[in-house]
Amino acid sequence: MRDLVVTENITLDGVIDASAGWFTVGNDAIDDQSDILAELMAHTAACDAVLFGRVTFEDMRGYWPEQDDDQTGITEDLNQITKYVVSGTMDDPQWQNSVVLRDLDAVRALKEQPGKDIVSTGSITLVHDLIAAGLVDEYRLFVYPVVLGRGARLFADGQAAPDLRLVETKSFKSGVVLLRYRTA
């Protein structure tokens, strides 16, 4: 059985909504994030699929394939890896190596297939559903030294958090800290 890993960039107060501008990607980064990018590449090597909700998928599809001067390798990786989008309305994903899944039963079936990790990032509505369905095996949280006080959180108000076991901590030059948790 494959692991489903939720990877999120998150503030100290648990916000994953990046619309306030606290998070930048790759070439846009102000601080040296080469060590974070190296960590992400190691995570990418351990997975063979990414899982998105429709909104995040459309955002990613609208940004990454258009990057022709990407020095991070993210564009190439995203174009090559199998991408799954959970959507009840999308028919044609319009991005190479992309597959539409209709529901969480399809995600559960995907986990049962042989292969490497399946990673979900962003996609907060989907992630909340994955958490509620007990489908998440690991959380990789890149914690940024920022406090926002409001915004979408990894664990929604009233949502029961699973029992978690800390398996790794790692700090980066920028002050970001990776916390890896496995579900108990």
Image (cartoon, grey):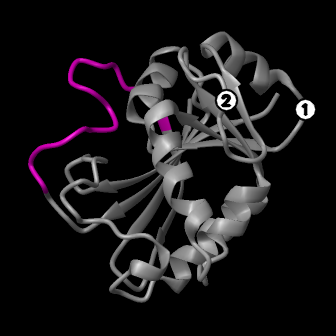
- The chief SS type of the magenta part is loop
Q: What's the amino acid at mark 1? A: Pro
Quarter of the image where the N terminus is located = top right
Relative to 32, residue 89 above or below? above
Quarter of the image where the C terminus is located = top right
Relative to 127, residue 175 above or below? below
Secondary structure beneath disc 1? loop
Observer-side mark, 2 or 1, equals 2
Tell me the CA gap for discs 2 and 1: 25 Å
Residue 163 showing in the rendered view: no
Q: Nearer the viewer, residue 32 or 177?
A: 32
Q: Nearer the viewer, residue 172 or 62?
A: 62
The reply, left or right, for residue 123 in relation to residue 107 is left
Residue most extreme to the right = 114
Residue 150 covered by magenta stretch? yes
Q: Position of residue 67 (x, y in %)?
A: 57, 71
Q: Residues within 10 Å of mark 2 (few under 14, many from 20)?
A: few
Q: Position of residue 30 (x, y in %)?
A: 33, 85
Secondary structure beneath disc 2? loop
The reply, left or right, for residue 55 in relation to residue 19 is right
Residue 161 covered by magenta stretch? yes
The reply, left or right, for residue 30 in relation to residue 183 is left
Q: Residues within 10 Å of mark 1 (few under 14, many from 20)?
A: few
Residue sitting at 82 percent across and 44 percent down? 116
- Which numbered circle lies on residue 92? 2
Q: Which residue is mark 1?
A: 114
Q: Which residues are magenta?
A: 148-164
Q: What's the amino acid at mark 2? A: Asp
Residue sitting at 62 percent across and 61 percent down? 65
